[in-house]
Amino acid sequence: MVVLFYLINQTVIKAWTDHWFIHWYVNDLLAGIWLPALTMALAASFRVHQILMLSGAKILLVVLVAGLFWELIAPLYVTGSVRDPFDILAYVSGGLIYLLIMRRIRIPW
């Protein structure tokens, strides 16, 4: 669902609006949801249960490290990439949304 919403945001929503949040932060927020979900799916698929994304600390660690990497290290090597500390906040916010969703649906592992 996150990837679908990302594609809709990129192709439709951004064309409809010039709102700063939609253009600058929604994709980072979605990445904060997608990263722990992807990590969880891979860990479950490969039966590596010790890295399942069940604790808030693990979830926040993954999104924080990813945000720091993309905002501090990637701009050194990726042309056109800029540093924006609010992107890190968007990643962490996405991780918190993921955590709330996981606690709400309570998937048994």
Image (cartoon, rainbow, N blue to C red):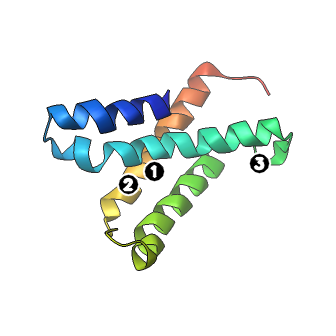
Instruction: Give the labeled residue for mark 3.
Output: 51
Contact between marks 2 and 1 (CB within 8 A): the answer is yes
Tell me if mark 1 has few (under 14), some (14-19) or many (20+) residues whose alpha carbon lies within 10 angstroms of its own: many
First-in-chain label (1 vs 3): 3
Q: Name the residue nearer the viewer: 74 or 32.
A: 74
Tell me if mark 2 has few (under 14), some (14-19) or many (20+) residues whose alpha carbon lies within 10 angstroms of its own: some
Residue 88, image x and y in percent?
A: 40, 58
Secondary structure state at the residue bearing disc 3: helix
- The answer to whether residue 62 is above or below residue 53 is below
Instruction: Give the labeled residue for mark 1.
Output: 92
View extreme (left): residue: 18
Q: Residue at x 62, y 51 (%)?
A: 57
Secondary structure state at the residue bearing disc 1: helix
Q: Distance between the residues labelled 1 and 3?
A: 19 Å
Q: How many marks?
A: 3
Instruction: Give the labeled residue for mark 2.
Output: 89
